[in-house]
Amino acid sequence: MKLINCIKREKEETSILLRSIPSTVVTLFVVSVICMNLLANKTLVQNTWIALDGGILISWLSFMCMDIITKYFGPKASNKIAILASAINLLTCLIFYVASIIPSNADDYTALNEILGGTWFILLGSTIAFISSAIINNFLNWIIGRAFINNPDGKLAFATRTYVSTFIGQFLDNFIFSIIVFVGFAPIFWDGFHWTVLQCAMCALTGAVAELIMEVLFSPIGYKILQKWKKNSIGKDYLCYINKDGE
């Protein structure tokens, strides 16, 4: 009975959450996750000590959205949205794959089919890396925020929790993905093509720095969004729901 009640509560809580978070943020988050997965198929830079894939161009947006949601709704809410985005990404990849295997005599769609069909181990690696790093990012963001007792809603508190959690979260996302894809599977399925562990680490570090810079540039927008949400009492139903039992 406890398990059933818990499931019902989680279902109700999630339903209220999805009605409470402004759709623009959720949409940007989901789209960034889908684009990140597609762009990860292309290596942008590779030499003896560093390698970067195309996902670096958009992944900062995913983490900025998570940081905004975590600050306003809490890490649990942000984790749920991250899982939702991953699920939508998987569904999108499935639809793309089906489209890629449907034959057509209208034109030569070989190149397009290769893009839409994707690579299963890239999808696996990106999903594992994203969910793992998202959970770590969200809870780290929340823990750092709790240290600012006097002014938890100030600019310093927001910047500190956002920059630290983003850097660590982005590093782990890039590193886990690189190890799984370019060290684990690529040598087997891509005719020996691979990255070294050093390249993975440098990719993760360089990517984290680059994405942190993007976060620094755009975080003022995130802070203004939070201030506007607070002023307009956005998500009041969800916040009341999770706090009604003293949570």
Image: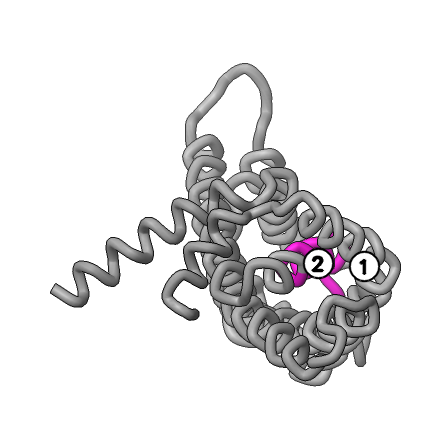
Residue position for label 2:
64
Magenta span main SS = helix
Which quadrant, please, contains the N terminus? bottom left
Q: Residue 19: x, y in percent?
A: 48, 41
Q: Can residue 42 be seen in the rendering of this structure?
A: no
- Amino acid at circle 1: Ser
Residue position for label 1:
219
Quarter of the rendering containing residue 48: bottom right
- Amino acid at circle 2: Met
Range shown magenta: 52-67
Residue 5's label in the rendered image is none
Q: Is residue 74 left or right of residue 228?
A: left
Q: Distance from label 2 to label 1 (Cα)?
A: 7 Å
Q: Can residue 106 be seen in the rendering of this structure?
A: yes
Residue drawn at x 46%, y 31% is 99
Which of disc 1 and disc 2 is earlier in sequence?
A: 2
Task: Answer whether labels 2 and 1 touch (C-beta < 8 Å).
Answer: yes
Q: Is 165 a magenta residue?
A: no
